[in-house]
Amino acid sequence: MTDWKKAYGELEIQGERRKKRTPTAKTIEKFESDTRITLPTSYKEFAEVFGTDELAGYYRFTVPLGHSDQYDLATFNETSHGSPGDATWGEYAAPEILEKVLFFASTIGGELFAWRTDEVTDSKNSDYAVYRFLRRPKLREVAKSFEEFFDKCLKGKLDTFDEPPPKSYLKY
């Protein structure tokens, strides 16, 4: 398991004047109870250390904040799914797959990342496969766990960059 405090300490922190917004264990538990979804252990630990953020100048993460906010996990997931009856993601996958998708991150370009909660990759730590919703209708698995996803984001392994992404974290 990743030592999230150490990982946080190794990044260049930007937005120092902004207050870091992290969830409490109680807020996370409420989200899990309300949605009946157990979040990955590594993600919960990450959320309590990092909070809402932009990693490497490109990837934006949401966490359970317990109130309506664009960086609240529940709000972000609901908004990303679209309104009832919308065929927002119909080109990507069948409805029975999409209803098991939990959106948790995006790029600055608007591409989305989600767990498929029906694809458990580590039952002990409640981890799920991570999928990327590209701008074109193609759903693509990018990682087997949240830790692998974070590592790939930090190392620029999910996208083609002219140069390695900055090892930075911007508070949101």
Image (tube, grey):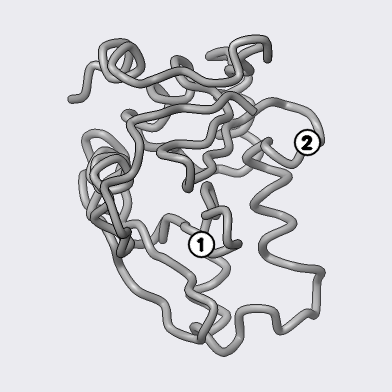
Q: Pick whichever, 102 or 155, lies toward us.
A: 155
Question: Quadrant of residue 147 in the image?
Answer: top left
Q: Name the residue under label 2.
A: 69
Point out residue 29 in the picture as x, y percentages from the top left corner: 56, 23
Question: Quadrant of residue 5 in the image?
Answer: top left
Q: Name the residue under label 1.
A: 101
Q: Which residue is drawn at 47% across and 24% down?
A: 47
Count of numbered circles in the view: 2
Q: Pick whichever, 101 or 88, lies toward us.
A: 88
Circle 1 crowding by C-alpha within 10 Å: few under 14, some 14–19, many from 20: many
Amino acid, disc 1? Val
46 versus 152 height, above or below: above
Q: Which residue is drawn at 64% across and 52% down?
A: 77
Point out residue 11 in the picture as x, y percentages from the top left corner: 34, 21
Point out residue 108 in the picture as x, y percentages from the top left corner: 57, 53
The disc placed on residue 81 is: none
- In space, the residues marked 2 and 1 are separated at their CA atoms by 20 Å
Circle 2 crowding by C-alpha within 10 Å: few under 14, some 14–19, many from 20: few
Disc 1 is placed on an element classified as strand
Position of residue 31 in the picture relative to residue 163 (left or right): right
Disc 2 is placed on an element classified as loop
